[in-house]
Amino acid sequence: MMSKALALIVFFAGFQSFAEKVAIDGSSTVFPITEGIAEEFQNANKGIQVTVGISGTGGGFKKFCRGETDVQNASRPITESEIKACQEKGIRYLELPVAYDAIAIVVNPANKFLSEITTEELKKIWEPSAKGTVTKWNQVNNKWPAEEFKLYGAGSDSGTFDYFTEAIVGKSKSSRGDYSASEDDNTLVMGISKEKNALGYIPLHYYMENQKKLKAVAVVYKGKSQKPDLEAVKSGAYAPLSRPLFIYVSDQSLGKKHVEKFVTFYLKNAIKMAEEVNYIALPKIAMDMTQEHFQSKKWGTVFKGHAEVGMKVEDLMKKEKQ
Amino acid sequence: MNLSTNSLGSSVKFRHFLSFIFKILSLLGLLLGLIVLLVLIGDLIRRGGDRLSIDFFTNFASRKADRAGILAAWVGTLWVMLITAVLTIVVGVSAAIYLEEYAPKNRATRLIELNILNLAAMPSILYGLLALGLFVHQMKLGSSLLTAGMTLSLLVLPVVIVASREALRSLPFTLKEASYALGATQFQTLVYHQIPAALSGIMTGVILALSRAIGETAPLITIGALTYIAFLPQSLMDSFTVLPIQLFNWLSRPQEEFHANAAAAGLVLLFLTFLLNGVAILIRIKARKNIKW
């Protein structure tokens, strides 16, 4: 009651803005692509105000499911509790894959013994029960030295954290807590590049921009060892740590002409923009499927609240179609 | 005391020596502060100096570092400062006047005074959390210019209240007595004599408070202002960005070129702070000249 009265007062005070707006929030990983698209879109459409926030995938979904934003940047699919939150507010949404990203396992360049690591070894290091007990390299693999390692990883509001834990530990958000966590990937890069015994995980493009300061470790999954690079991510060979990036658009917002215009513009330019900002673009065939998905307005998610590990967007979109 | 002339002489020498040492230490303290400031400015100029061009001020933020500018950020900063200043002066000075001139001197008043002093020491991010709950969600103002102005105003109010009270209190009591003696009411005394006489002190407090607010980042990020903005606000309800937030955003990018932009934006922010402090000094000089007792 109180809040409504106050909102009314502000409204009648004449503070209401009448500009056409597209409000976007969410993942810092998807941000560079969306920011680039927003820049070009506003150059082409003067007068439409596009804002792109960085609240993390989790923080963004909270706003999205309250109806405060039109478009949500997500570096993982929507989770069960978020599906529920949206349902309660009657918000339906389109789930549109727009690019790929991968998580790179990186160490200090001075580290000579680690050139590949299995997903099992990663799990041994990162699972919650490792907290305080697994602290030395040789506890993970007896060929490694008996020195203490220092861990660096994404903070818990980030989609990178959710995806990494899901892919490695097996359960989203399930991780040891005694490591240097930051939502700011630059902080992680700095930390790992200064600490000889560091091990960390960061979004692939942060490794790409800092190849002199960091060394990427190949990941062994189902017996196959693979270094992270653009080709391996595109072909699906860099499993399980590559992932699709999404935007979610709410049905109410799509009813607004300028939001629909923005999303159309986004999908048309997503491949070009992803390449420009050093991300991994969807193959054209997958992008066509995203387009089709957008045209046919199929609401909801195909993930049932879980990220599917190591899935290619083409396969994913086939699933969306059914 | 049984001092021979000799020991008195050496003791005097020693005391002079002590006072000389003290003078040197004070000077060193001052120099240290100045040197740190100079090194900081020099470092910023080295990193970002050649990014400062007219384009840098007239371009919006961009994904391309050499095309990115601070138009939305410096306009946003001016807007937010204006809103903060208006709110802070109106509310802060009123509160100070009430506390100093009207409030009964009892336990409740003392409790309020004590808490205002405490508030001045609260970490700024707590004000951000308060604003997120109250302004953004309860009052549904969103992360708008108005929200930002109100948040920063809350943050600096304690400083302004305390400074304004000090300014009012330091006036000679005879000023009030003279005014009353001539038949003026308390209100007339305040408006025509006390406030004009205390104005230089009040304005100094306000501007010092504003130069703290201008660099604040944490509470604004908390209300959701960490945003890519490429337009100028047209109303109080529009989204915005400010210089510290633009700086923070550029620093968190992997590309080195953006860090140069951040340094350049830092220089602009420093310059704005110097400007504000300059204005404070000018106002003080002018206000002093206008007092004719």
Image (tube, rainbow, N blue to C red):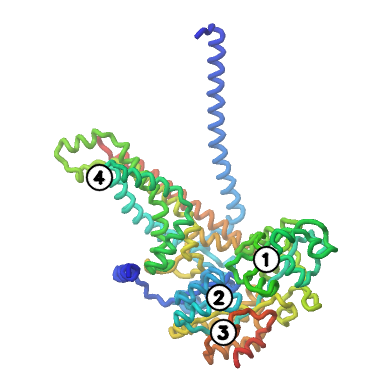
Q: How far apart, in angstroms, are the residues tagged by discs 2 and 1?
A: 28 Å
Which residue was labeled with disc 2?
Answer: A73
Give the number of callouts.
4
Callout 2: helix, strand or loop?
strand
| Chain letter belonging to callout 4 | B
Q: In the image, which disc is placed on residue B102? A: 4
Q: How far apart, in angstroms, are the residues tagged by discs 1 and 3?
A: 29 Å
The amino acid at mark 3 is Thr
Q: Residues within 10 Å of mark 1 (few under 14, many from 20)?
A: some
Closest to the camera, between mark 4 and mark 1, is: 1
Q: Are marks 4 and 1 on the same chain?
A: no
Callout 1: helix, strand or loop?
helix
Q: Is residue A23 left or right of residue A73?
A: left
**Depth check, front residue: A209 or B128:** B128
Residue B90 in percent (x, y) is at 31, 53
Callout 3: helix, strand or loop?
loop
| Chain letter belonging to callout 2 | A
Tell me the residue at 46%/77% (across/down): A22
User: Looking at the rendering, which quadrant does residue A221 occupy?
Assistant: bottom right
**Depth check, front residue: A22 or A218:** A218
Which residue was labeled with disc 1?
Answer: A128
**Depth check, front residue: B83 or A67:** A67
Q: Earlier along the polypeptide chain: callout 2 or callout 1?
A: 2
Residue B133 in percent (x, y) is at 43, 64
Q: Are marks 2 and 1 on the same chain?
A: yes
Q: Is residue B208 visible?
A: yes
Q: Is residue B116 left or right of residue A135?
A: left
| Chain letter belonging to callout 1 | A
Residue B73 in percent (x, y) is at 48, 62
User: Looking at the rendering, which quadrant does residue A321 occupy?
Assistant: bottom right
Which residue was labeled with disc 3?
Answer: A301
